[in-house]
Image (cartoon, grey):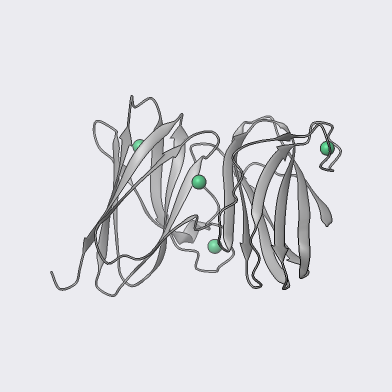
Amino acid sequence: MTERNLGFIRLGSSQTVNAFFPGALVTQTDTYAFRTGSVAANVAISTSASGGSGVFALALFRDNDASGTLNVGDTFLPPGDNSIGSFHSLNRVLSQGNYIARAQTFSGTDTPYTFRIARASTGGANPLTTPEIQLGTIEQDLTKRGSISNDNSADNYAFSLDQGDRLNIKVKELGNLSGDVNIRVVRDLDADGIVDRNEILVKGTSTVQGNIDALSVGGRGDYLLQICQGQGNVRYTADFDLVTANQ
Ligand SMILES: [Ca+2]
Ligand SMILES: [Ca+2]
Ligand SMILES: [Ca+2]
Ligand SMILES: [Ca+2]
């Protein structure tokens, strides 16, 4: 178990830690303590394993006694991410306070992984390029459903396109339209897990009524669609409309 203290995470900043779980068939835990400032802002946290057979669980806690150590009395902030796969992420609006992110594994083989955290204005887009939802190579039209709220302030869909293919993406906000999402497609060209300015390929545009955000992207490559909280709680459907080269 390694306890790290990342200190204050400034608005608009990110930190990356290269970490390592040695292979051992017991539950292993690393913790990352951090502080946030007076602006309630979107905090995105991810772990990405680059080897081993590690199954991670990623969870976030409020460090109520500001001890930097996870102890009785600290509060779990749901939801955690206990999914199977090499990437885990949380994105959530956090008010000023002390927090601890916890990464866990249970793996017989060594598991190197990268821990990332970024804090950005809510309404700005998710600064991390964690492929939470894997769509693979798009070969036919798809529809996905999801929701965005203060507890899950972004959804990241990873997809690939073949040469000559183009994808028209339409995200429709459902329900009473009290909330708003923004969309964009990014590529992590330098593979640092952070969306750099030159990595934003296209931003969505909204319809006049404001409940549909749309964009189009084409050409062979690996892409990430980010559906990010503008404000409030939003249920959405995302339509992926494939236009193939030989149509
Ligand atoms: Ca504590
Ligand atoms: Ca999400
Ligand atoms: Ca919108
Ligand atoms: Ca990058």
Residue 174 as seen in the image, left or right of residue 111: left
Percent across and percent down for residue 24 are 78, 68
Q: Nearer the viewer, residue 8 or 137?
A: 137
Task: Establish if 42 lies above or below 233.
Answer: below
Q: Is residue 212 visible?
A: yes
Res 206 quadrant in image:
top left
Percent across and percent down for residue 7 are 79, 45
Number of marks drawn = 0
Q: Residue at x 81, y 52 (%)?
A: 4
Q: Nearer the viewer, residue 230 or 57?
A: 57
Q: Is residue 193 visible?
A: no
**Quadrant where ligand 1 appears:** top right
Percent across and percent down for residue 74 are 78, 34
Q: Residue at x 41, y 63 (%)?
A: 223
Q: Name, please, the residue furthest toward the front.
A: 25
- Where, quadrant-wise, is the C terminus in this rendering? bottom left
Q: Name, please, the residue furthest toward the left.
A: 247
- Where, quadrant-wise, is the N terminus in this rendering? bottom right
Residue 89 as seen in the image, left or right of residue 102: left
Percent across and percent down for residue 86 are 58, 64
Residue 30 as seen in the image, left or right of residue 198: right
Q: Residue at x 40, y 42 (%)?
A: 146
Res 161 quadrant in image:
bottom left
